[in-house]
Amino acid sequence: MNIFKAIQVKTTIKNLISLPNLKEYHVLALVFLEGENDSIFLEESSVFLLKKSDVVKNSYRINELLGNELSKERLEELFS
C-alpha cells in the first residue's frame, strides 16, 4: 500500500528554529545545521521529525525536540 505524506522542512544554523507560515503538511522536519565558514557538516547536524498534531509552538530549541530525532524507528512510526 502506498502512503502519501507531505513533509515541510524548516532549517536553521541557530539554536532556535522559528515556524512562520507553515503550509499544508503531515510531517514537519526541523533541521539544525552545524558548520564552519562556508562548510556544512551534515554528520554533526540534527534532524527532528514531528507529526502535525505535535507542533504546538511557533519555535523550538533542540532540547525541546529530543525523542523525535530522525531514525529508522521514527520513520516507521510516522509512515506506517
Image: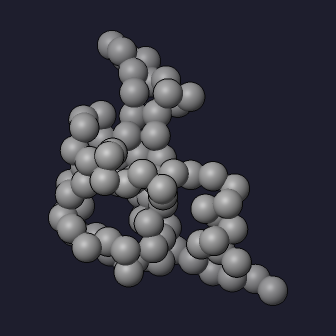
Q: Report the side of 60 relative to 40 (left or right).
A: left
Look at the image and tell me in which quarter the C terminus lies: bottom right
- On screen, residue 78 versus residue 24, left or right, reads right
Q: Quadrant of the N terminus?
A: bottom right
Residue 49 position, x and y percent, is 48, 60
Q: Residue at x 26, y 47 (%)?
A: 61
Residue name at image x 21 percent, y 68 percent? 57
State the count of labels: 0
Q: Quadrant of residue 24?
A: bottom left
Q: In percent of the image, x 39 and y 21: which residue is there?
A: 35
Q: Is residue 78 above or below residue 29?
A: below
Q: Is residue 24 above or below residue 46?
A: below
Residue placed most toward the observer, 61 or 38: 61
Residue at point 38%, 81% (across, down): 53
- Side of 5 relative to 2 (left or right): left
Q: Specify the farthest residue to the right.
A: 1
